[in-house]
Amino acid sequence: MQITGPLLSGPLCRAARALTQMSRPALAELSGVAKRDIRDFESGAALDERARMALRHALEQSGAVFLDEDDDLGAGVRLRFTQPDVRQLQRFESEGGKAGEDDV
């Protein structure tokens, strides 16, 4: 997993989780990082690089885009999708049913 850009910090993780509307349990499941470790990390505790990369990857898969620090501004996070895109994706995902093979 090759990730470029700012190294994930606790505040960036918390902000990305809020923007993507992802709960700690959901992030823990998607990233493989323990829920308690995520809570501690967001509160200022250290977290190893592998776990930070796993969290960042999971958040990026959920629509977070991490922004590099530059001369004028610090590192940040924004959504990859617009709100109409998010609503459309949520509608598709909530349609249910088992995905099947396509013979096309």
Image (cartoon, rainbow, N blue to C red):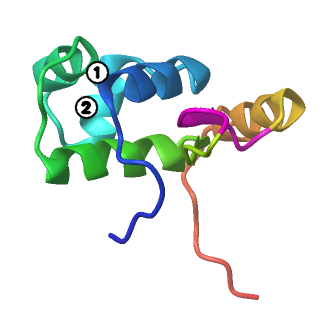
Residue 94 forms part of the magenta stretch: no
Label 2 is placed on what type of residue?
Answer: Ala
- 1 relative to 82 in the view: left or right: left
Mark 2 touching mark 1, by CB under 8 A? yes
Label 1 is placed on what type of residue?
Answer: Pro
Residue 51 % position (x, y): 18, 45
Please state the extent of the stretch shown in magenta in the rendering: 72-81
Q: Residue 25 carries which label?
A: 1
Residue 21 % position (x, y): 55, 19
The secondary structure that most of the magenta stretch takes on is loop
| Near-viewer residue (83 or 2) | 2
Question: At 25% across and 44% down in the image, what residue appears?
Answer: 52
Could you tell me which secondary element the residue under label 1 belongs to? helix
Question: At 57% across and 59% down in the image, what residue appears?
Answer: 99
Q: Callout 2: 10 Å neighbours few (<14), some, many (20+)? A: many
Could you tell me which secondary element the residue under label 2 belongs to? helix
- 81 relative to 7 in the view: left or right: right
- The residue indicated by pointer 2 is 28
Image quadrant where one finds the N terminus = bottom left
Q: Residue furthest right?
A: 84
Residue 28 vertical placement versus 50 (above, below):
above
| Near-viewer residue (11 or 70) | 70
Q: Callout 1: 10 Å neighbours few (<14), some, many (20+)? A: some
